[in-house]
């Protein structure tokens, strides 16, 4: 196998990460973390900020800021669009 080539197992993992089930679970996990940190249900706008991201990489990009932000930063972030 050539250096840097993607194996079938890696490709299957990548496809699995981007399955509807995996994406929805990741969205739900991020929303749960945000709601727990804020101590309330997310508004429609805040939830949409998370659920409009439909790719694993896009969700990874918002996961850390949601986890690491203060409550005030998190509210601003989720309402930034």
Image (cartoon, rainbow, N blue to C red):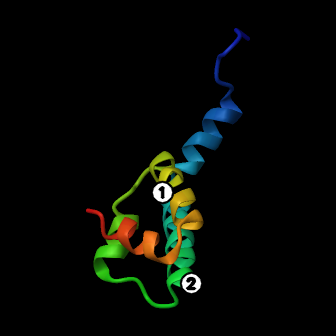
Residue 49 horizontal/vertical position (percent):
34, 66
Quick one: label 1 or label 2, which is nearer the N terminus?
A: 2
Residue that appears at 49% across and 66% down:
27
In the picture as drawn, the residue positioned furthest to the top comes out as 2
Q: Which residue is mark 1?
A: 62
Q: What is the quadrant of residue 5 in the picture?
A: top right
User: Which residue is farthest left?
Assistant: 81
Q: Position of residue 67 (x, y in %)?
A: 58, 66
- Is label 1 in a helix, a strand or a loop? helix
At 53% from the left and 72% from the top, the residue drawn is 70
Q: Residue at x 66, y 15 (%)?
A: 4
Task: Give me the residue at 64% from left, 42% from top.
Answer: 13
In the picture shown, does residue 53 fall above or below 34?
Answer: above
In the structure shown, which secondary structural element does the residue marked by tag 2 occupy?
Answer: helix
CA distance for labels 1 and 2: 16 Å
Foreground residue, 18 or 66?
66
Q: Which mark is residue 36?
A: 2
Position of 49 relative to 45 (above/below): above
The front one of 68 and 61 is 68
Q: Callout 1 environment at 10 Å: few (<14), some (14 to 19), or many (20+)?
A: some
């Amino acid at each position: 196998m050539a250096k840097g080539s993607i194996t079938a197992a890696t490709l299957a993992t990548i496809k699995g990460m981007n399955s509807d089930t995996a994406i929805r679970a990741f969205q739900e996990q991020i929303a749960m973390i945000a709601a727990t940190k804020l101590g309330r249900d997310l508004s429609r706008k805040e939830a949409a900020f998370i659920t409009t991201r439909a790719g694993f990489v896009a969700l990874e990009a918002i996961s850390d800021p949601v986890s690491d932000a203060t409550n005030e930063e998190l509210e601003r972030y989720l309402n930034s669009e």
